[in-house]
Amino acid sequence: MMMAEMDKTDAAGRALPEAADVLATRFGPVPLDPDRQFRFRGGLPGFPEAEHFQLDPIPDLDSDFMMLQAVGVPDIGFIVVVLPDDVPVIRRRDIEDVRAMLDIACGELMVLAVVTLVPTEKGVEKVVNLRAPLFVDARRKLGAQVVLSNPAYPLRHPLVWSEAGN
């Protein structure tokens, strides 16, 4: 196979769209999809240059983990997990307060937590930041990272409630 042909396929050999329609990620290229993009006004803390992100499943990984990749800034991307409604890791009242503050309509809120891998003596532990989750308005395609005032929410909460945590 010639080099030009290799550049037009992903790791699984699937044809990719033209370069202008591809988002570079640490997991390989994924098609740009405006329906999966969100704007974080002013960027995320520490990353003001990246306001536009795309949320996708991680390619070739059957998991609850997702990737939140900065559009146009390939070095900025995060592994995230959608916080489940049926597991109250954040009090419903706190979520509703943020939803109202950000003027997100009922049923349009998606709450994401950034996943971090922490080395331990037993291997690697997956933890999420519950103190500063990402709140996304699915309809308006806007997001914000909100630092919750309740000190009970840890920066490193063990990820155990979903298949992603196993």
Image (cartoon, rainbow, N blue to C red):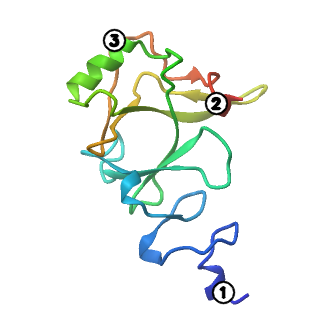
Q: Residue 30: image x %, image y %?
A: 53, 63
Q: Residue 91: image x %, image y %?
A: 41, 12
Distance, label 2 to label 3, CA atoms, is: 26 Å
Q: Earlier in the sequence, mark 3 or mark 1?
A: 1
Q: Which residue is drawn at 57% across and 34% down?
A: 116
Q: For the residue labelled by badge 2, is the local secondary structure a helix, a strand or a loop?
A: strand
Question: Which numbered disc covers residue 126?
Answer: 2
- Tag nearer the camera, 2 or 3: 3
Amino acid carrying label 3: it is: Arg
Q: Which of marks 2 and 3 is nearer the N terminus?
A: 3
Give 159 or 140, whichever is nearer the viewer: 140
Question: Which numbered disc covers residue 93?
Answer: 3
Q: In this view, does 14 lie to the left or right of 77?
A: right
Vertical comparison of 15 with 104: above or below: below
Q: Which quadrant is the N terminus positioned in?
A: bottom right
Quadrant of residue 63 in the image? top right
Q: Which quadrant is the C terminus positioned in?
A: top right
Give 142 or 41, whichever is nearer the viewer: 142
Distance, label 2 to label 1, CA atoms, is: 38 Å
Question: Which numbered disc covers residue 3?
Answer: 1
Q: Earlier in the sequence, mark 2 or mark 1?
A: 1
Q: Residue 164: image x %, image y %?
A: 65, 33
Q: For the residue labelled by badge 3, is the local secondary structure a helix, a strand or a loop?
A: helix
Q: Which residue is drawn at 41% across and 29% down?
A: 133
